[in-house]
Every structure is written in structure tokens, then in C-alpha cells.
Amino acid sequence: MLRRSCDASALKPCLTLCIALVWCGALVAQAQPSRAVPATRNPQGGPVAAALSAEPSPEVATFTFFNRPIVVLRARVLGRRPIERAAGAQRILDDLVEQGITGPVGSQPLDGGVLITVGSRGVFGLTSPDIDELSGETLDGVTAQTVANLQQALNEAAEAHAPVALLGSVALAAGVLVLAGLVLWGLARAHRVVAAKLVALAEQKVTKAGIAPLDALRASRVLDFERYVVGGTVLGIDLVVIYWTVAFVLRRFPYTRPWGESMRGFLVTTLENLGLGIVNGLPGLFTVLVILAVTRFAARLVKLWFDSVERGRVKPVWIYPDTAQPTRRLVTTLLWLFAIVVAYPYMPGSQTEAFKGVTVFIGLMVTFGSSGLVNQIISGFMITYSRAMRIGDFVRIGDVEGTVTHLGVLSTKIKTLRQEEVTVPNAVVVSQTTTDYSRPGDQEGVFTPTSVTIGYDAPWRQVHALLLLAAERTPGLRREPKPVVLQMALQDFYVKYTLFVCLERQESRPFTLHTLHAHIQDLFNEYGVQIMSPNYRGDPAKPKIVAKKDWFAAPAFPD
């Protein structure tokens, strides 16, 4: 396990582990068990040359000698299972190696199979049931491969019993380990130096170009990303060096040589498959790029046309200017989704099991998490295409009142009169009553009411005139349609008068109504008309009004 930046102390475990591998390989090679078992011979003293009685076995055993696979046994021969045949051959070969007999390896044909021999001694037999004919194997081909594998394993067993050769391998492996340690140490120092120089160069270039101040640049994650890139590159080189070193050391010793060869073969095969995959994926990748380019061009045309609709240059009968922008987003999204579906089969790796597994996982996530999401999206479509509200409208949704600043796919944002931004989910907007105060309704205007209660002893025509005069003096009210006064109720002790006015700007409603109410109080006081709200208990000795001389009593002063 490697850290991102290695130093000399971090190399000690790696060197210790690799040196242990070196000596273990040497010791294991010399510590192979040897068991001398008499070979089966015929009455004349020669190797078995009788016909082999074989039948297919449900068990399969791979005969391995000196850590190298020799052949796969699949048959019962003379009543012996494949695993028993492999164990018997192992004992015979151990005995031969102890006697110094490591070749030549040959084969003798028998009735129904082949006998594999070492020197003049039979080791094991191969029969027709041992051959996997479905995979294209033949008895002659398997025999030749078995002879080659066994000869290589015997040569390595003989090499493991040669101390001089083992000492040479140990010395070479130790030298390679020291060299690898020096390379890793040099990479660690180079990592620190290169990272520092690149960061300093980036700071100098950015500050010199005036893109951002030095403090802001250091506070951002840009420089950290640069360090991560350098560290990742060095880490990759470290892994390659360690991988190559371990494979080289393992190949120096006979017993561990198959492991080293498999590591080298794995790396070569992986690189080969990667290169072939890239080459084979180029036509599909080119097709994907063409599909994406065509889709991008089509999306630009769609944007151009819908922008013209939104500006009123194009007036189709099936779409309104205020719904052009969300419709453009919807059409563009569908266009890109269609492009992804068409390009999917041409993507490199799309037919692999990993790619399919990721696709299924994403599909399950969307399926389980889309119930609420789809509800919000459908509600957003209802709001948009029912034209219930538009951006800039002053609305009331439940207890929230303010100006619509955003109509999204999932939510609607409203800026209240207190400058608060409230986010309302689209499903909540659809489920509640929405009042839009900004729709002119064919220039009829939206009336805002305000009410007062006046006693029956005040002439109603005078009250009407006073309310209309207060509306006339109030700025921010529309002159058309004209303000209207209606007697909404005849209560027990007073009459309820309601003044309906149209505001020029709904978002300034509190300030406009404040001014209107102030003018109403001033006019009613000026003309001696008593306002009966909120409650009426009896006629006072004199009207409850404020004399004009007291309108600006301290600390008030005239506007």
C-alpha cells in the first residue's frame, strides 16, 4: 500500500517485503517434499505398457508440479480418480528430482492413451476421456503441451537445487530492489519539487494576468487540484515501478517464476486489450461525436426560434410568448435525451457488463426516487401551460404574498414585500389557491379594497365624495379604471363603505395603502365626519375627530 508521496522511510516496508519474497522463493524451492515410491513396472522390469482402462470422471483435477500447471485430468484410470492420479505423479516426480533425473520428458503411445515418461520411467498416463473435445483439444496436442510443461517444471526444479544459481538470483533481485527503492525515493523528492514549482508558476501567471488576487486564488481549490494531478501522476509511476519490480523478483526464482510470468502477462494483456479497445471504439466514438454535433446544432436552432417567439417576432397560434422559454427548455431536454438514446449503442464499452450494471443501478435510483420528483415536474408543467402566473406577477399563494421571480421545473420562487425569497414546491402551488394581482384582465385592472364604517347620521353621498377625494390625492393609484365606492353592509349602528382602487404597482401595495389611509383620516377629520370603526357603543357628546390645528401636534411636523 502506497501513500501519495513516498519518502525514504516509506520504502523500508516495501524493501523488507520484497527481500522476504526473494528468500521465501529460494527456500520454498529447496524445501519441496520428496517421497520415494517404487514405480509400477511390468514383469520384465520395463514401464507399464498395458492398455489403459479409462472412463470419464465427474471430478476434475489440475496436475501441478513445482508451482507450474502441467495438465488437467478428467478421467478415472484403472479405478483411480483424477486427484489420486495427480498425487501419484507428484510422488514419482519428487523421487526423480531427488535422484537428479530431470529428463528427457517423452511420451509412449498405448492402447487408448499415451504414457508420459521421464527418462525411462513412466509418470502418468493421458487417455481420451482426459481430452476436452468441445474446446477443440486433441490427444496429440495435449500430449505435446504436457511434455513441454513438464520439462520446463523439471528444469526449474533442478535449478532450485543449484545453490550457485540461487545465490546469483538473490544477488540480482537484491540489486533490483535497491534500484527500485532509489527510483521511488527520487520520485518522492521530484514530486515535492515539481508540485511546488507548478503551484508557484500558476500563482505568478494568474496574478500577473489579473484574473484573481493571490489570497482568493490560494483560498480556492484550483491549486489543490493541480497538486492532486501531480500527486496522482507520481503515484501511478510508483505503482508501475513496484509492479515491475515484484514481477522481476518473482521471475528470478524457479518456484515463484510462474507468478512473475502471470503478472507480466496480466500487464501486457491488459495494455493490449486497452489499446485494442481504444482502436475498436474509434468508429463508435466518431459516430457519437457526429450525433452530439447534430443535436447541438438542432438545439441552437430551437433556441433561436423560441427566442423569436418570446420577443414577439414569430407568433404561432399554439404557443404564447410567456410559455416560450419553458417550452424551449423542455424541447431541448427531450432533444438531448433522444440523442443520448440514439448514441448509447455506439459508446465504447456500452455492451460490457459493468456499463450495463451502472445503467441498471441508475435506473433503479430514478425509479425509487422519482415519485416525488415526477409530481413536482408535472405540477411545474401545469403552472407553466395553464399560465396561472408569470415572472414579475404579484401573487398570493396560501400565506405567501410577493412577486414571482422564478418559475422552475420543481419549485416557484417568490420575493415578499419584506425582501424575503420564499421557495414554494410546485405541488404546493397546484394544491393551493393562487391569486394573481398583476393580470390586467383586458385593461380592466385589479381592484384593491379598503373599508371604513360611518354612522347613519353622516350623509352617504358625502362619505362617497370623501373617499373618492382621498383616492384622487393618493399617488400610485391608476386613474383608469376609476376608483369606486360601494356600501357593502348596513350594520346595526353604522354603514360599511368600501373603496376599490387599482394600484399601479402591486409590489408597492403597503406604501400606497398607507398613503391612502392617511388621506382618508385627514379628509374625514377636516370635514367633521366621525369614523365609527372598530366598534360602536353609543353616541359621544361630540364627534370623535381631530381638529385641523392639531394635525401636526408635536413631535409631528408638516410634510
Image: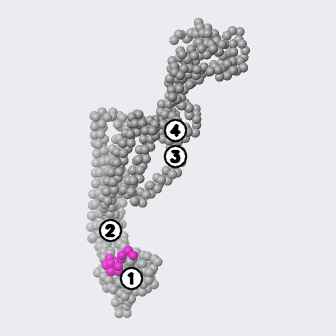
Q: Amino acid at mark 3?
A: Val
Q: Is residue 122 above or below residue 495?
A: below
Circle 3 residue: 374
Circle 4 residue: 386
Circle 2 residue: 257
Q: Amino acid at mark 2?
A: Arg
Q: Are marks 1 and 4 in contact (CB under 8 Å)?
A: no
Q: CA distance from mark 1 to mark 4?
A: 82 Å
Task: State which region is magenta.
Answer: 134-147
Circle 1 residue: 127
Q: CA distance from mark 3 to mark 4?
A: 18 Å
Q: CA distance from mark 4 to mark 2?
A: 76 Å
Task: Please tell me how crowded label 3 is: few (under 14), some (14-19), or many (20+) other residues with Cα within 10 Å.
Answer: few
Dot in front, 3 or 4: 4
Residue located 28% across and 51% down the image: 186
- SS label for mark 2: helix
Q: CA distance from mark 2 to mark 3?
A: 60 Å
| Overall secondary structure of the magenta section | helix
Dot in front, 2 or 3: 3
